[in-house]
Amino acid sequence: MLYDVVSAMADFFKSEHNLKLRGWYIKTPEGVGKKLYPEEVQMDAALLPAPDAPMADAIRAIMSDSRIPGSMKMKYQQAWRASRGGAGAGAPSGAVAAGAPATLKRLIEDKGEHELGSRKRILLEDIDLTTTDGQELVNAAVVLRLPSDSSA
């Protein structure tokens, strides 16, 4: 998972509060929403057919490959077509970036473009939580206690 720390937060909600984390968006200071959870499925460039493969063969290979989720088949076709034209040389867009933030504080600062500085707490908004029987928690207030700067 791109952000293991968010997965750990989802596990915490499940084990400690019997809640399921269905989604989490964070707003930048400009109000732009960015999706943090669930992460989007990443493409594996190794599953793309060779750029010089005939189109019918490449499409057939993508469509019949059980390792490619059905919802991603069109993205793989688009990435393969782009690789034929030299754009991206076969590297799919949305590839996993190295160096993912290691703490929630860094994730909020990096992805949400917030400067938390020495803040001790932050109210997490736009968290979609449900109970195990499927009831939504409306306006769930989640306050995150931030670590000191030395342990961030």
Image (cartoon, rainbow, N blue to C red):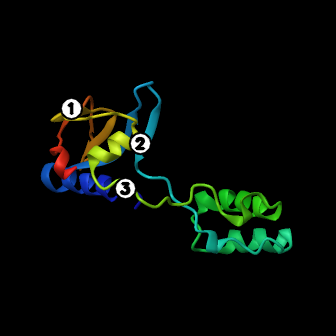
Q: Earlier in the sequence, mark 1 or mark 2?
A: 2
Query: Which numbered mark, 3 or 2, is in the foreground of this view?
Result: 2
Question: Measuring 15% from the left and 44% from the top, which residue is drawn there?
Answer: 148
Find disc 3 in the rendering and name its residue: 3
The kind of residue tagged 3 is Tyr
Splitting the image into 4 quarters, where does residue 140 fall?
Answer: top left
- Tell me what residue is drawn at x 57 percent, y 55 percent: 94
* 13 horizontally vs 76: left or right: left
- Give the vertical position of 118 relative to 83 (above or below): above
Q: Which mark is residue 141?
A: 1
* SS at circle 2: helix
Quote the CA–CA distance across marks 3 and 2: 11 Å
**Crowding at label 3, few (<14), some or many (≥20) Cα neighbours within 10 Å?**
some
* Badge 1 or badge 3: first in the primary sequence: 3
Q: Position of residue 145 (x, y in %)?
A: 15, 40
Is residue 100 placed above or below 63 in the rendered structure? above
Q: Nearer the viewer, residue 119 or 65?
A: 119
For the residues labelled 1 and 3, the Cα–Cα distance comes to 22 Å
List the residue tagged with mark 2: 111
Of label 3 and label 2, which has the lower sequence position?
A: 3
Write down the quadrant of residue 12 in the picture: bottom left
Crowding at label 1, few (<14), some or many (≥20) Cα neighbours within 10 Å? few
